[in-house]
Image: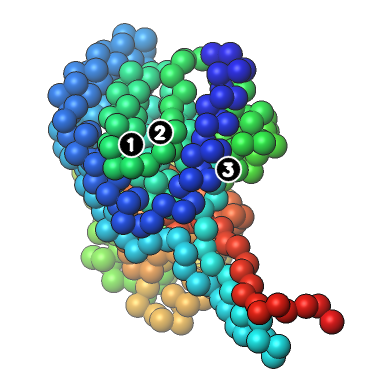
Amino acid sequence: MSTHTVQVIAQQSRLAARQLASVPESLRNLALAKMAETLESVKHQVLAVNAQEIIKARDEGQSDAMVKRLTIDDKTFQYMLSRLKKVAQLPDPLNRILAGHTNPAGLRVYKKSVPLGVIGIIYESRPNVTTDAAGVCIKSGNAVILRGGSEALQTNTLLTDAMIEGAVNAGLPQHAIQIIRTPGHEAVGELLKMDDYIDVLIPRGGKGLIQRIAEGTRIPVIKHYDGICHLYIAADANPEQAVALAINSKCQSVQVCNALETLLVDKKCAEQLLPLLNTAFAANNIELRGCEQTQKLLSNIPAATEDDWHTEYLAPILSVKIVDGIQAAIDHINHYGSGHTDGIVTQSLAMARQFEEQVDSASVMINASTRLSGGGDYGLGSVVGISTDKLHVRGPVGPYELTTYKWVAYGDGHLRS
């Protein structure tokens, strides 16, 4: 794809974004409904094309985890549609009055929410990102440029064309949703140069992809780095609840960013709990790697190395460490964690509050599975990632997070004295 072609796409998106900024909520919601309807009409084509891309990915030796993320089946497709419908039902993220006052001279000043403008989404393997990203951007009045991985190019193109048709039929600008249709890295490189037209980039994929994007552009990047998620089982934790939360956090889906990667067990309950946890994880085919103290209680597991505490496995492997109290747990999390999601199991409100206040993470879970951190369970509907940054947004990135604000002042001939 030529520089000119990418530049034209970016310019078209900028013009569409300016039109979208004043589109009323009712029309944006109608567009989301039409997008879902049009997607439904091409479902069989999508599944057929996706099946061919899955075969190709397997033939090329892609990992099972990659193939799983690439796959759309009937259940996944319905889930994608439901997310579009859910985001349409959310309150309008635009034109909210965030602050305001009337000054002594009668000047009325207020701050209101507005779209960011043009959002570029660069992602790997997951075709559901195509529909999630388009839905979140349209809800928040942003134009979106999609650039999925070459392994799902045909699936993503088919999904995007259906959504474009639905959005245009509802009355949105032709270029509110666009996709870069050529494989290879050249187009991505050109996209990274479009800082005159693109307001924010959101990469979704492995750490390597995100680093390449962030280091290769002057456009602000909302980054979604590792999910090195922890669960600390405090000395007073209910054993049955602790085991259930640890198992769900790790085993419900091992290859996702909010899955548990390191389990911290207080030394006061370790002797009682570790055998129960070992049995439960073994039943779920999870390999445990333990610190020296853990190995003394579970002699059959290998040692955890320094690298293990830094690792996002995205696999059926879990590192386990015995810690001496809540402060040691917090210190470990803040040193080794990625600021994604970390939790505590405790019956003490004081310890829960200490953990909440001192753990430096986007999501802190109190007696809840780490798997609950994200758009759906937080009531956001679709999201386009979970930011481990602190600027411009932190945690799940939904419609509200893809807004900024402007100041407006209403006067009656007011002058500066």
Label 1 Cα crowd, 10 Å radius (few <14 / some 14-19 / many 20+): some
Residue at the farthest front position = 413
Q: Position of residue 308 (x, y in %)?
A: 51, 41
Identify the element where label 1 is drawn: helix
Split into 4 quadrants, where in the image is the N terminus? top right
Q: Gap in Å between the C-alphas at discs 1 and 3?
A: 24 Å
- Name the disc covering residue 168, or none: 1
Q: For the point 59% across and 55% down, which residue is it?
A: 392
Name which residue type carries label 3.
Val
Q: Gap in Å between the C-alphas at discs 2 and 1?
A: 6 Å
Label 3 or label 2, whichever lies nearer to me, is: 2
Label 3 Cα crowd, 10 Å radius (few <14 / some 14-19 / many 20+): many
N-terminal of the pair, mark 3 or mark 2, is 2
Residue at the farthest top position = 59
Residue with the mark numbered 2: 174
Residue 103: name its quadrant.
Answer: bottom right
Residue with the mark numbered 3: 200
CB atoms of marks 2 and 1 within 8 Å: yes
Q: For the point 28% across and 37% down, which residue is it?
A: 169
Q: For the point 47% across and 68% down, which residue is it?
A: 96
Name which residue type carries label 2.
Gln
Label 1 or label 3, whichever lies nearer to me, is: 1
Label 2 Cα crowd, 10 Å radius (few <14 / some 14-19 / many 20+): some
Name which residue type carries label 1.
Val
Q: Gap in Å between the C-alphas at discs 3 and 2?
A: 21 Å
